[in-house]
Image (cartoon, rainbow, N blue to C red):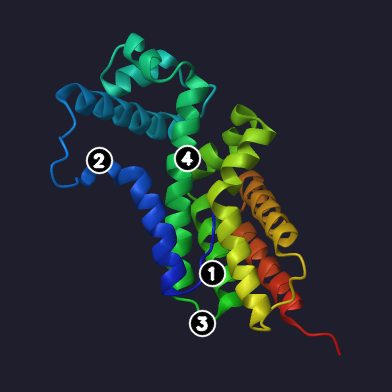
Amino acid sequence: MAPTLGRCKTDKVRYTNEMRDSDSDSQEPGEQRPSLRAEHVAQTRAALVAAGMQLFGRSGFAATSVEDLAREAGVTTGALYHHFPTKAALFESVFERVHQELMTASNEAALKASGPVDSLAAAFEAFLDKVLEPDVQRIVITDAPAVLGPARFTELDERDAFGAIVAVLKLAADSGALQADDPATLARLLLGMLTRGGMLIASSPEPVATRDAVASTIRAILAGLSSRPA
Protein backbone atom coordinates (compact mmCIF):
# COMPACT_ATOMS: atom_id res chain seq x y z
CA MET A 1 0.00 0.00 0.00
CA ALA A 2 1.02 3.60 -0.30
CA PRO A 3 -0.10 6.95 0.98
CA THR A 4 -0.08 10.09 -1.09
CA LEU A 5 -0.23 13.72 -0.14
CA GLY A 6 -2.45 16.28 -1.82
CA ARG A 7 -4.44 16.25 -5.01
CA CYS A 8 -1.44 16.38 -7.33
CA LYS A 9 0.29 13.36 -5.85
CA THR A 10 -2.91 11.34 -5.65
CA ASP A 11 -3.85 12.13 -9.22
CA LYS A 12 -0.41 11.04 -10.36
CA VAL A 13 -0.66 7.67 -8.60
CA ARG A 14 -4.20 7.11 -9.79
CA TYR A 15 -3.21 8.02 -13.32
CA THR A 16 -0.37 5.50 -13.22
CA ASN A 17 -2.62 2.72 -11.91
CA GLU A 18 -5.38 3.53 -14.38
CA MET A 19 -2.95 3.47 -17.27
CA ARG A 20 -1.81 0.00 -16.25
CA ASP A 21 -5.37 -1.32 -16.10
CA SER A 22 -6.98 0.63 -18.93
CA ASP A 23 -4.45 1.09 -21.74
CA SER A 24 -6.85 -0.67 -24.08
CA ASP A 25 -9.57 1.89 -23.32
CA SER A 26 -7.69 4.76 -24.99
CA GLN A 27 -7.24 4.90 -28.75
CA GLU A 28 -5.24 7.36 -30.80
CA PRO A 29 -6.78 8.72 -34.02
CA GLY A 30 -6.23 6.20 -36.80
CA GLU A 31 -5.19 3.46 -34.40
CA GLN A 32 -6.78 0.08 -35.08
CA ARG A 33 -8.95 -1.50 -32.43
CA PRO A 34 -7.70 -4.76 -30.91
CA SER A 35 -8.56 -7.85 -32.91
CA LEU A 36 -11.29 -10.18 -31.77
CA ARG A 37 -8.62 -12.66 -30.76
CA ALA A 38 -6.82 -10.05 -28.65
CA GLU A 39 -10.09 -9.12 -26.98
CA HIS A 40 -10.83 -12.78 -26.27
CA VAL A 41 -7.36 -13.23 -24.76
CA ALA A 42 -7.86 -10.20 -22.53
CA GLN A 43 -11.31 -11.39 -21.45
CA THR A 44 -10.03 -14.86 -20.62
CA ARG A 45 -7.16 -13.49 -18.60
CA ALA A 46 -9.49 -11.14 -16.73
CA ALA A 47 -11.86 -14.03 -15.99
CA LEU A 48 -8.99 -16.09 -14.58
CA VAL A 49 -7.80 -13.24 -12.35
CA ALA A 50 -11.37 -12.68 -11.14
CA ALA A 51 -11.68 -16.39 -10.39
CA GLY A 52 -8.40 -16.27 -8.51
CA MET A 53 -9.54 -13.32 -6.43
CA GLN A 54 -12.73 -15.20 -5.55
CA LEU A 55 -11.23 -18.60 -4.75
CA PHE A 56 -7.87 -17.61 -3.29
CA GLY A 57 -9.69 -15.07 -1.16
CA ARG A 58 -12.25 -17.58 0.06
CA SER A 59 -10.28 -20.81 0.41
CA GLY A 60 -6.61 -19.83 0.25
CA PHE A 61 -3.87 -20.80 -2.20
CA ALA A 62 -3.20 -24.35 -1.00
CA ALA A 63 -6.87 -25.39 -0.92
CA THR A 64 -7.60 -24.05 -4.42
CA SER A 65 -6.81 -26.34 -7.35
CA VAL A 66 -6.12 -25.44 -10.96
CA GLU A 67 -9.33 -27.28 -11.85
CA ASP A 68 -11.27 -25.13 -9.38
CA LEU A 69 -9.87 -21.98 -10.94
CA ALA A 70 -10.61 -23.05 -14.51
CA ARG A 71 -14.15 -24.07 -13.58
CA GLU A 72 -14.81 -20.76 -11.83
CA ALA A 73 -13.49 -18.83 -14.84
CA GLY A 74 -15.46 -20.95 -17.31
CA VAL A 75 -12.38 -22.09 -19.22
CA THR A 76 -10.38 -25.29 -19.64
CA THR A 77 -7.24 -26.03 -17.62
CA GLY A 78 -5.35 -25.83 -20.90
CA ALA A 79 -6.57 -22.26 -21.38
CA LEU A 80 -5.46 -21.42 -17.84
CA TYR A 81 -1.98 -22.76 -18.49
CA HIS A 82 -1.84 -20.84 -21.75
CA HIS A 83 -2.11 -17.59 -19.78
CA PHE A 84 -0.39 -18.61 -16.56
CA PRO A 85 2.29 -21.32 -16.53
CA THR A 86 1.64 -22.13 -12.87
CA LYS A 87 -0.98 -21.58 -10.21
CA ALA A 88 1.54 -19.36 -8.43
CA ALA A 89 1.81 -17.14 -11.53
CA LEU A 90 -1.96 -16.59 -11.45
CA PHE A 91 -1.76 -15.86 -7.73
CA GLU A 92 0.87 -13.18 -8.43
CA SER A 93 -1.50 -11.41 -10.82
CA VAL A 94 -4.26 -11.64 -8.21
CA PHE A 95 -1.94 -10.20 -5.57
CA GLU A 96 -1.08 -7.28 -7.86
CA ARG A 97 -4.77 -6.54 -8.45
CA VAL A 98 -5.59 -6.62 -4.73
CA HIS A 99 -2.52 -4.49 -4.02
CA GLN A 100 -3.79 -1.86 -6.46
CA GLU A 101 -7.11 -1.81 -4.60
CA LEU A 102 -5.23 -1.27 -1.34
CA MET A 103 -3.37 1.65 -2.87
CA THR A 104 -6.61 3.19 -4.11
CA ALA A 105 -8.12 2.97 -0.63
CA SER A 106 -4.98 4.53 0.86
CA ASN A 107 -4.96 7.33 -1.70
CA GLU A 108 -8.58 8.20 -0.97
CA ALA A 109 -7.93 8.27 2.77
CA ALA A 110 -4.85 10.46 2.34
CA LEU A 111 -6.87 12.99 0.35
CA LYS A 112 -8.99 13.72 3.41
CA ALA A 113 -5.99 14.34 5.69
CA SER A 114 -5.00 17.78 6.95
CA GLY A 115 -1.22 17.54 6.56
CA PRO A 116 1.66 15.27 5.55
CA VAL A 117 1.93 13.36 8.83
CA ASP A 118 -1.83 12.88 9.07
CA SER A 119 -1.79 11.85 5.42
CA LEU A 120 0.62 9.03 6.20
CA ALA A 121 -1.37 7.89 9.23
CA ALA A 122 -4.68 7.97 7.36
CA ALA A 123 -3.27 5.99 4.44
CA PHE A 124 -1.74 3.40 6.75
CA GLU A 125 -5.02 3.04 8.65
CA ALA A 126 -6.89 2.51 5.38
CA PHE A 127 -4.54 -0.40 4.71
CA LEU A 128 -5.26 -1.84 8.15
CA ASP A 129 -9.01 -1.49 7.54
CA LYS A 130 -8.71 -3.50 4.32
CA VAL A 131 -6.74 -6.20 6.13
CA LEU A 132 -9.84 -6.78 8.27
CA GLU A 133 -11.55 -8.11 5.14
CA PRO A 134 -11.03 -11.91 5.14
CA ASP A 135 -10.28 -12.26 1.43
CA VAL A 136 -7.75 -9.41 1.38
CA GLN A 137 -6.17 -10.73 4.56
CA ARG A 138 -5.85 -14.24 3.17
CA ILE A 139 -4.32 -13.14 -0.14
CA VAL A 140 -2.05 -10.28 0.93
CA ILE A 141 -1.05 -11.21 4.47
CA THR A 142 -1.40 -14.97 4.90
CA ASP A 143 -0.54 -16.45 1.50
CA ALA A 144 1.49 -13.90 -0.45
CA PRO A 145 4.77 -14.05 1.51
CA ALA A 146 4.85 -17.87 1.28
CA VAL A 147 3.61 -18.23 -2.31
CA LEU A 148 5.68 -15.43 -3.82
CA GLY A 149 8.71 -15.82 -1.57
CA PRO A 150 10.16 -13.02 0.57
CA ALA A 151 12.16 -11.36 -2.22
CA ARG A 152 9.34 -11.23 -4.80
CA PHE A 153 6.77 -10.29 -2.16
CA THR A 154 8.92 -7.35 -1.05
CA GLU A 155 9.58 -6.31 -4.66
CA LEU A 156 5.88 -6.19 -5.53
CA ASP A 157 4.91 -4.59 -2.23
CA GLU A 158 7.45 -1.80 -2.73
CA ARG A 159 7.03 -1.31 -6.47
CA ASP A 160 4.34 1.36 -6.18
CA ALA A 161 4.22 1.98 -2.45
CA PHE A 162 7.87 2.74 -1.79
CA GLY A 163 8.19 5.72 -4.12
CA ALA A 164 4.96 7.27 -2.92
CA ILE A 165 5.91 6.98 0.75
CA VAL A 166 9.39 8.40 0.11
CA ALA A 167 7.83 11.37 -1.70
CA VAL A 168 5.52 12.13 1.22
CA LEU A 169 8.35 11.76 3.75
CA LYS A 170 10.55 14.16 1.79
CA LEU A 171 7.74 16.69 1.56
CA ALA A 172 7.03 16.36 5.27
CA ALA A 173 10.72 16.73 6.12
CA ASP A 174 11.15 19.76 3.86
CA SER A 175 8.18 21.46 5.50
CA GLY A 176 9.49 20.72 8.98
CA ALA A 177 6.50 18.53 9.81
CA LEU A 178 8.55 15.38 10.36
CA GLN A 179 12.16 14.32 10.91
CA ALA A 180 13.35 12.04 8.11
CA ASP A 181 17.09 12.25 7.50
CA ASP A 182 16.94 9.07 5.40
CA PRO A 183 13.48 8.89 3.78
CA ALA A 184 14.25 5.73 1.81
CA THR A 185 15.23 3.72 4.87
CA LEU A 186 12.33 5.11 6.89
CA ALA A 187 9.89 4.22 4.09
CA ARG A 188 11.05 0.60 4.08
CA LEU A 189 10.78 0.41 7.86
CA LEU A 190 7.23 1.79 7.70
CA LEU A 191 6.29 -0.76 5.04
CA GLY A 192 7.70 -3.53 7.19
CA MET A 193 5.75 -2.22 10.15
CA LEU A 194 2.53 -2.31 8.13
CA THR A 195 3.18 -5.87 6.99
CA ARG A 196 3.85 -6.98 10.55
CA GLY A 197 0.77 -5.09 11.73
CA GLY A 198 -1.28 -6.95 9.14
CA MET A 199 0.09 -10.25 10.42
CA LEU A 200 -0.87 -9.32 13.98
CA ILE A 201 -4.42 -8.61 12.82
CA ALA A 202 -4.60 -11.86 10.85
CA SER A 203 -3.52 -13.98 13.82
CA SER A 204 -5.55 -12.14 16.46
CA PRO A 205 -8.69 -13.58 18.10
CA GLU A 206 -9.91 -9.98 18.27
CA PRO A 207 -8.85 -8.48 14.91
CA VAL A 208 -10.72 -5.19 15.27
CA ALA A 209 -9.16 -4.45 18.64
CA THR A 210 -5.75 -5.43 17.26
CA ARG A 211 -6.29 -3.17 14.25
CA ASP A 212 -7.02 -0.27 16.59
CA ALA A 213 -3.93 -1.02 18.69
CA VAL A 214 -1.70 -1.18 15.60
CA ALA A 215 -3.15 2.07 14.24
CA SER A 216 -2.67 3.83 17.58
CA THR A 217 0.94 2.66 17.77
CA ILE A 218 1.66 3.84 14.23
CA ARG A 219 0.26 7.28 15.04
CA ALA A 220 2.42 7.41 18.18
CA ILE A 221 5.53 6.54 16.16
CA LEU A 222 4.73 9.21 13.57
CA ALA A 223 4.07 11.72 16.35
CA GLY A 224 7.49 10.93 17.76
CA LEU A 225 9.07 11.57 14.37
CA SER A 226 7.13 14.82 14.17
CA SER A 227 8.52 16.23 17.44
CA ARG A 228 11.57 18.45 17.24
CA PRO A 229 14.46 17.98 19.68
CA ALA A 230 14.76 20.63 22.39
The extreme top residue here reads 78
Asked if labels 2 and 1 touch by Cβ distance under 8 angstroms, the answer is no
Q: Earlier in the sequence, mark 1 or mark 3?
A: 3
Determine whether 33 is above or below 41 in the image: below
Q: Earlier in the sequence, mark 2 or mark 3?
A: 2
Which label sits on residue 96?
4
Which label sits on residue 24?
2
The mark tally for this picture is 4
Amino acid tagged 4: Glu
Element on which disc 4 rests: helix
The extreme front residue here reads 30
Q: Which quadrant of the structure image shows residue 1? A: bottom right
Residue 41 drawn at (x, y percent): 26, 24
The extreme bottom residue here reads 230
Q: CA distance from mark 1 to mark 2?
A: 33 Å
Element on which disc 2 rests: helix
Amino acid tagged 3: Ser
Q: CA distance from mark 3 to mark 4?
A: 29 Å
Q: Earlier in the sequence, mark 1 or mark 2?
A: 2
Q: Earlier in the sequence, mark 4 or mark 1?
A: 4
Amino acid tagged 1: Ala
- Which residue is depicted at the point 53% across and 44% down? 137
Viewer-nearest of discs 1 and 3: 3
Q: Which residue is mark 3?
A: 114
Q: Which quadrant of the structure image shows residue 222? A: bottom right
Q: Earlier in the sequence, mark 3 or mark 4?
A: 4
Which label sits on residue 209?
none
Which label sits on residue 122?
1
